[in-house]
Amino acid sequence: MQSKALEILVGFFVCLGVAAVFVLTFRVASLETTSTGKTYAVTALFENIGGLKPGAAVTLAGVKIGRVRSITIDPATFEAVVTLDISNDYASIPEDSDARILTAGLLGEQYVGIVPGGAEEPLKDGSRIKFTQSALVLENIVGQFLTNMTAKSAQSGSDGTQ
């Protein structure tokens, strides 16, 4: 009788552990939705989107206001065209706002952060955000640092100074 109770208890804790993993997975993937189902779409051009993916969060002052709908390439400029679905609850964002690709958390999840401008006219469905800041790619930063350090050491070696 006691082994049967122990087996039920162990089974309960295993189910609880599996449920906790599911909750954690959905939290990390941030699959929760915005406050209303109605959205409007705006686009932004980026030179480099890093690891941004469709479904990533769009935030304003740290508050989630939408999601990335799609990412395509502009055939004329070869830049990434990112389409953002923003909740109608936030329909007063100034049209001169800028969009930045930022990184959140230890896992490096990337998202789009909107920094409001000062224009009177708000973004509308089909608007394009003109001011953007691409993702910081760690490999590019390290490569520039190494190039600069190599150039400095080569220059100090050719000057005869050590």
Image (spheres, grey):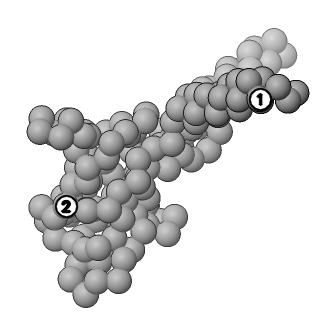
Residue 103 shows in the view:
yes
**Percent position of residue 19, x then y:** 58, 32
When the figure is inspected, residue 68 is found, relative to residue 121, above or below; the finding is above
Q: Which residue is mark 2?
A: 128
Residue at 40% across, 64% down: 114
**Callout 1: SS:** loop
Q: Residues within 10 Å of mark 2 (few under 14, many from 20)?
A: some
Give the left or right position of residue 49, taking residue 4 as reference.
Answer: left
When the figure is inspected, residue 132 is found, relative to residue 72, above or below; the finding is below
- Foreground: 7 or 21? 21
Q: Quadrant of residue 92?
A: bottom left
Three-letter residue code for mark 2: Arg
**Callout 2: SS:** strand
Q: Which residue is mark 1?
A: 159
How many marks do you count on the picture? 2
**Percent position of residue 50, x then y:** 43, 36
Three-letter residue code for mark 1: Asp
Residue 25 shows in the view:
no
